[in-house]
Image: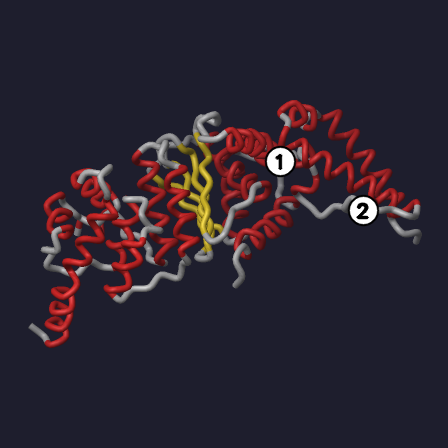
């Protein structure tokens, strides 16, 4: 096994399964879905951790990945903590050989400015995951998208433009609170869906 | 005493002073024996302040297990120290991590110093498992 294999394999598995995850239902059902999602992707989950200022911990090493959730959480908090761990695995990097991330109860408690910014992004993504509204977050987080490359034909130009939009969206989603707010609006996500559809059709080879 | 036990005891007699000196260096000036004993106890090792003192003076009668040695270094944020490397070497233990890895683990521990003691303890217990591949005992087993 090479270093970094653990989280990258889990990330791919989560992306595939998350898109097929049903939305809605009671909070406990949604918690169970996210727990199963993590466990099926190979993450060990422990709901009984004695944590005080942290809602969840995520630990990853060559020995595996595990998520610990504070025993004190109520159902709503637990659902969000599960969603935060899923979001963290999807959108953040866990460095080999061993890394851990804390999901603080107070989201401003992370020690560095960079971590607090990551925390805000993870929180926004977690809300989209918990509510089953993945369209409110950039698509590259959940699926493979075209990349921004040099383009010489109308078809490759369409693909490259689409890739550029995705890159731009992912970049600002990680860095700007304003963009995250804007991106999570229903009318914006609908408009983006339409633009992606038009460019996607233009980029497809003719039948 | 069985022959194997005698051998182990003789081996421990030969190294315990050097191990003790290394343990003392790992703890350093900034951490009291009482604080370390408390942290080790919370990790489930049943270590009192007098035991910390005896081991540091090379008077501990029972050899320290790999789990306790690494737990000691974990509590002292001294996984990357030369002292731990020496102790493991003379005790005949080996960890599958490089010096660079160990430095990264210490940096992680320092990064989360601001967490509450309970949160840090949970993290250390799980980190010990990841470092050694040993499943931590549950509280009932620890108190048995």
Q: Do callouts 1 and 2 point to residues on the same chain? A: yes
- Estimate the spatial distance between the alpha carbons at disc 1 and disc 2, rounded to whole Å: 32 Å
Front one among A153 and A69? A153
What residue is drawn where x is 12% and y is 47%? Answer: B53
Q: Residues within 10 Å of mark 2 (few under 14, many from 20)?
A: few
Of the numbered discs in the image, which one, if any, rests on residue A95?
none
Q: Is residue B91 above or below residue B54?
A: below
Of the numbered discs in the image, which one, if any, rests on residue A149?
2
In the rendered structure, which disc, 1 or 2, sits on the residue that comes first in sequence? 1
The answer to the question of whether label 1 and label 2 lie on touching residues, with beta carbons closer than 8 A, is no
Of all chains, the one bearing label 1 is: A
Counting from the top left corner in percent of width and height, residue B128 is at 34, 51
What residue is drawn where x is 9% and y is 75%? Answer: B2
SS at mark 2 in the image: loop
Residue at the outermost bottom position: B3
Position of residue B140 in the picture relative to residue A146 (left or right): left
Position of residue B58 in the picture relative to residue B77 (left or right): left
Tally the marks. Answer: 2
Position of residue A142 in the picture relative to residue A81 (left or right): right
Counting from the top left corner in percent of width and height, residue B20 is at 17, 54
What residue is drawn where x is 78% and y is 32%? Answer: A192
Counting from the top left corner in percent of width and height, residue A101 is at 46, 40
Residue to which mark 1 is pinned: A132
């Amino acid at each position: 096994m090479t270093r970094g294999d653990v989280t990258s394999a889990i990330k791919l598995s989560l992306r595939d399964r998350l898109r097929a995850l049903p939305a809605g239902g009671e909070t406990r059902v949604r918690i169970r879905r996210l727990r199963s999602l993590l466990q099926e992707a190979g993450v060990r989950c422990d709901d009984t951790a004695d944590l005080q200022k942290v809602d969840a911990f995520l630990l990853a090493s060559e020995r595996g990945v595990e998520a610990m959730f504070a025993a004190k959480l109520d159902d709503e908090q637990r659902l969000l903590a599960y969603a935060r761990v899923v979001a963290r695995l999807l959108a953040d990097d866990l460095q080999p050989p061993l890394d851990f991330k804390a999901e603080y109860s107070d989201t401003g408690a992370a020690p560095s400015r960079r971590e607090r910014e990551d925390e805000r992004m993870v929180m926004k993504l977690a809300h989209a995951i918990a509510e089953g509204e993945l369209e409110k977050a950039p698509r590259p987080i959940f699926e493979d998208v075209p990349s921004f490359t040099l383009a010489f034909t109308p078809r490759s130009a369409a693909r490259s433009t689409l890739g550029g939009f995705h890159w731009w969206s992912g970049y600002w989603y990680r860095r700007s609170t304003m963009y995250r707010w804007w991106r999570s609006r229903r009318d914006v996500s609908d408009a983006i869906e339409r633009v992606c559809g038009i460019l996607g059709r233009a980029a497809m080879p003719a039948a | 005493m069985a022959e194997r036990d005698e051998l182990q005891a003789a081996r421990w007699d030969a190294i315990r002073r050097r191990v003790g000196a290394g343990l003392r260096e790992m703890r350093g000036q900034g951490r009291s024996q009482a604080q370390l004993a408390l942290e080790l106890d919370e990790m489930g090792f049943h270590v009192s302040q007098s035991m910390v003192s005896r081991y540091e003076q090379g008077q501990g009668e029972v050899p320290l297990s790999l789990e306790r040695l690494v737990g000691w270094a974990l509590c002292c944020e001294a996984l990357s120290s030369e002292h731990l490397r020496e102790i493991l070497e003379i005790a005949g233990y080996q960890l599958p991590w490089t010096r660079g890895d160990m430095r990264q683990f210490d940096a992680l521990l320092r990064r989360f110093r601001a967490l509450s003691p309970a949160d840090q303890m949970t993290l250390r217990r799980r980190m010990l498992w990841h470092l050694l591949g040993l499943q931590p005992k549950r509280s009932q087993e620890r108190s048995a």
